[in-house]
Amino acid sequence: MEGDVVNRVKEKELILIGTVHRDPDGAARLKRLLAREGPAAVAVEVSPYGLYYRRRNGRRLRRRLMRKVRRAAKAMKVSWWEWGQIHAIWAQLAVPFEYRSGLTYCRERGAALTCLDSSQWSKTWIDTQWQQLLSLDNFTSLLQQIPENLGQEVKKGYQLAATLLNAGEQFPISAFVRSWSADPCWQQREAELARRLQRLYGQLPRGRLAYVGGWQHLLGPNAGGTVYERLAQLKPRRILLT
């Protein structure tokens, strides 16, 4: 038994940890999971640019968010606090919990941490999406919708992820992701994430490499070219953060 444990430690393994972004309990969950798995290296689905932008502008953007939310809520005579949609945007402007927990783990264990995503893709996304995200019109529209509980919505996300990840080859996952897989930008991003992850795996002498990112990247088979499918030859182990 002892020899088997030693052999397993010397082997290399890729584990893919799927998260629901903006999970309010995600930081604590991920911290426990990383401590249990003990990876030698951690790669997080965040780009250097996205991390830099949030660190430099996060406070300013959240102040802007709150000014416009309060203005919209006052005009509509509602309490914005009930809307989990607003809390989700607040979380999106902050440094992702995946990075924060990964950084804490790596500092404590002496493991290597890598920001895996493309800065070019991240910059394009922020430049094209965040102005609308933080607009008064967007908040006015959100406050006209039925309030959502962020914790409950995250729970539903994990339930959907579990259903799809456990479905096996017979489940038509491709129908669920057809809108993504038909997008050339999505395909390019998946290919780049997989390429960088494979390179990190090749550089690892032994132990586990843990990828932490959105659960959609773990889908497969028949999911249109996800990170999991592109790295199937490495026989990655998938873990959902619940």
Image (spheres, grey):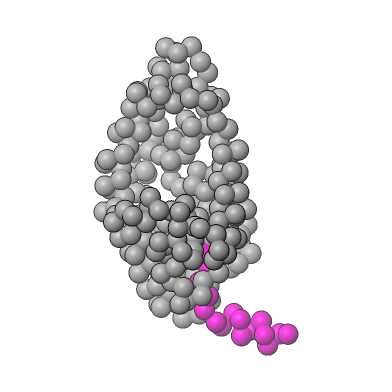
Nearer to us in this view, 171 or 144: 171
- Residue 206 in the image, given as x and y percentages of width and height: 50, 80
Left or right: 5 in relation to 92? right
**Which of the image's four quarters has the N terminus?**
bottom right
Q: Image point 38% across, 50% down: which residue?
A: 179
Q: Image point 45% across, 77% down: which residue?
A: 233
Q: Image point 60% across, 44% down: which residue?
A: 155
Whether residue 59 is visible here, answered yes or no, is: yes
Nearer to us in this view, 216 or 39: 216
Q: Is residue 3 magenta?
A: yes
Q: Is residue 29 magenta?
A: no
Left or right: 79 in relation to 178? right
- Residue 106 in the image, given as x and y percentages of width and height: 50, 62
Residue at the extreme bottom of the image, as rendered? 3
Residue 61 to residue 144: above or below: below
Residue 6 to residue 181: above or below: below
- Residue 158 in the image, given as x and y percentages of width and height: 58, 49
Left or right: 48 in relation to 96? left
Give the magenta part as a residue range. Answer: 1-16
- Residue 219 in the image, given as x and y percentages of width and height: 49, 60
Q: Image point 35% across, 23% down: which residue?
A: 136
Question: Residue 93, located in which quarter of the rendered image?
Answer: top left
